[in-house]
Amino acid sequence: MIDFLEYYKNKGHVFGECMSYPNIDLMYINIPKNASSWTKLTLTDHAWEFYNYHADQLNKHAIVVLRDPVDRWLSGIAEYMYLYHQNTDLTGCEELIFERIAFDDHTESQVLFLQGIDLKNCTFFICNANYKKNLLHFLNKHNDVGHADQHVTSDSPARLKFKNFFKQAIELNSKYKHRVEQYFEKDYKLINSVEFYDTTR
């Protein structure tokens, strides 16, 4: 039997991956393609360490970053293609891609990264232009992280090529967009049910 937590281990991710600091009641749950590279670099600079909340039995207040499911999937499928099928000719393979939707941790449903988490013991952030400011503001309230910023390289031309291909596909074919939205139905439900931390309010 395949262990659910290690379903994407061969792709480099184990469900439950998180970061925390020993003396504070906070942990950051790593959901790929949700500004995770910037967040991990920022927290690493302030001595946060890597854990797995399942294996390490962490029960701390969780920092959770969510992203619009279609936007995240476009970024995720571009990452997947870049990592594993960079030289693939995509012409005519749309039906195959949109029939499956999820191929790795970058394209999988966000709710699966939150298995076992008490959603009432979370602070949620939406992955948008204000995310960095909002997260640093939240962490500063806990006297943990300063205003140091990290630069993360933007999408490469190869990734953008794949992203634009699939973006055009869902714009031209509503059936494909519907399949993506249907697959991430639980993500939408979660996003619409929580309040996001926002310093502009």
Image (spheres, rainbow, N blue to C red):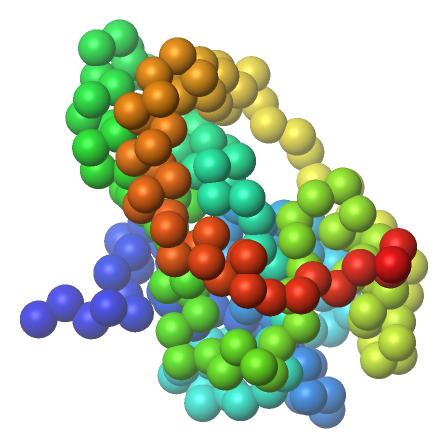
What residue appears at the point 29 percent right and 35 percent down from the top-left corner?
Answer: 179
Q: Using the image, determine if residue 18 lies above or below residue 92.
A: below
What residue appears at the point 22 percent right and 37 percent down from the top-left corner?
Answer: 100
Residue 186 falls in which quadrant of the image? bottom left
Q: Is residue 110 visible?
A: no
Residue 33 placed where, x, y %? 53, 46
What residue appears at the point 53 percent right and 20 percent down from the top-left corner?
Answer: 160
The quarter of the rendered structure image containing the N terminus is bottom left
Position of residue 105 in the picture relative to residue 65 (left or right): left
Position of residue 107 in the picture relative to residue 188 (left or right): left
Q: Is residue 70 visible?
A: yes
Residue 57 placed where, x, y %? 45, 89
The quarter of the rendered structure image containing the C terminus is bottom right
Position of residue 63 in the picture relative to residue 148 (left or right): left
Position of residue 105 in the picture relative to residue 194 (left or right): left
What residue appears at the point 58 percent right and 23 percent down from the top-left corner?
Answer: 156
Residue 86 falls in which quadrant of the image? top left
**Residue nearest the viewer, comparing 188 with 2:** 188
Residue 151 placed where, x, y %? 77, 41
Count the marks: 0
Q: Residue furthest left?
A: 1
**Residue nearest the viewer, comparing 173 with 58:** 173
